Amino acid sequence: MSAPLLSVEGVSVTLPTPRGDLRAVDGVDLKVEAGRTLGIVGESGCGKTMLSRAILQLLPKRARLEGRVMLDGRDLASLPRAALRKLRGPELAVVFQDPMTSLNPVLTIGTQIVETLQVHLGMAAAAATKRAAELLAEVGIPAPGQRLRQYPHQLSGGMRQRVAIAIALSCEPRLLIADEPTTALDVTVQAQILDLLAREQQRRHMAMILITHDLGVVAGRTDEVAVMYAGRIVERAPTRQLFARMRMPYTEALLAAIPKLDSAPHTPLPAIGGRPPDPTRPLAGCSFAPRCRYADDRCREAKPPLADAERAGTLYACWHPL
Amino acid sequence: MDMLGRRAPPSAQHLLGTDQLGRDMLSRLIYGARFSLTVGLLAPAIAIVIGGGLGMLAGYFRGRFETLVVGGVDVLLAFPPLVLALAVTAYLGQSITNLTLVLGVLGIPAFTRVARAVTLSLTEREFVVAARALGATHTRILLRELLPNVLLPLMAFFLLGVAVTIVVESALSFLGLGVPPPAPSWGSMIGEGRESLDLAPWLAFLPALVMFATVLAFNVVGDTLRALTDPRPGAL
């Protein structure tokens, strides 16, 4: 096994709030190797986005970061700002959830791609414009030369997300973080965008982190999946293995909550009862215990560690694995 | 100048008549445009540069700097504008420069507030985070990402500012504290014409009409320009 490109070691993010410190991410460990895709799955507010911001070093000003984020052997948190700026783009890039707001509304698509190329790769204007058109063609935008002169609002949501991907890919990043890249798009476009991301990831041999709340999205397109709940990773396994045998009750409940095409009409959809715990009031035991149907006293008193108890390649944090 | 034909109605010799001293009204109106427009354009220009700059910095960097700027602007806003203008012209003397500076400073709070409010909401948008994720510096984000967005509402406000400043300048000139006589400005011409409203009403009405047309023109031009240049749908 090669050395991981990205390694997240014991990362915690704490946000001060009027109601006390909010622990958005709690002791997360992750590794991603070049050319591999990691899926991070969890419901809203479980810390997925904060974790991605921690990796990108784009946390809100007041947030406190503990632990280390190592990219190719460099600790990002201790890098000086200028050095970090140089990494962003050529090493680390990101695609955001909402293509409506992630493009500047008053600059043309062309300007936004061309400037990125000029700043990071030092390209001349003419060469950068040519490259920008190539990039748009690569992400599947027809008539790229004409699109370059258009403004974001003249494109559809899917097109805009393609442009955002083209900008992220423009500097040939080694790690691409896609933070819910398809949530704001409709279903047919979702599949196209995910296929595009998978194709470019393969072609460029990038490492990719695909963040989503949809287990279905990660199923076919990732090598490994980490399930997050209340700021912690509660189960982590190679994708195939995870879907073959999930050990954490939360993962099971998450999968059960996906509507199935072959179930009879009017079948009630199982939902996970209750709400995630208040992140400003950490629980003594397992954070999923209040909503878990297998929970007993031990779950409420002691936090299960994330460990591979059976040496089978699946890490899980549960006292009563399925 | 026609000392014998004072307050003459329009004629072939004086197309718009003469004023109470026998000066040609048309010439004075045209000459007055120089003062009214200089002050009317320069004062908001000062305000948009200083106010817009402060507002963007405050909205982008937040923190103590923002508190300071907002506090300072509120103090300026709480001050009765006409009284400040009166005090400054009274102490520093009547001159075009002083008048422009006072009206410029008085315009700062409005621009600061607009710029700050727009910047605040824009900074939350993902394209700013996206720019940072691509390694943009603060300067770059402010100038390249935020400024083009903030400039649109500021320009709309600028044209409004021009209209308001021309009116305020007229008010000050009307009070005798604006452009020093005998140089004509539209406001002082209205002021002088007021004394003979019953004998020669055009002396007050003509400059008022010109002022009205100018302000209207600025608004129409401003609206059209915005409609033509704003790339966003539905505009502001």
Image (spheres, rainbow, N blue to C red):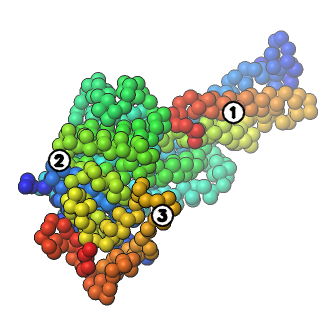
Give coordinates of residue A123: x percent, y percent.
Answer: 24, 30
Location of the C terminus of chain A (image quadrant):
bottom left
Label drawn at residue A267: 3
Q: Check disc 1 and report the residue beneath it.
A: B215
Residue B50 at x, y = what percent?
49, 45
Marks 1 and 3 share the same chain: no
Badges 2 and 1: C-beta atoms under 8 Å apart? no
Q: Secondary structure at mark 3?
A: loop
* Amino acid carrying mark 3 in the image: Thr
User: Which element carries disc 2, helix, strand or loop?
Assistant: loop
Residue A8 on image: x %, y %: 20, 62
Q: Nearer the viewer, residue A305 or A22?
A: A305
Residue under label 2: A35
Q: Is residue A115 visible?
A: no
Number of the front mark, 2 or 1: 2
Q: Which mark is residue A173?
A: none
Q: Residue at x 38, y 74 (%)?
A: A279
Q: Amino acid at mark 1?
A: Val
Q: Can I make out residue A303 in this image?
A: yes
**Callout 1: chain:** B
Q: Residue at x 21, y 76 (%)?
A: A305
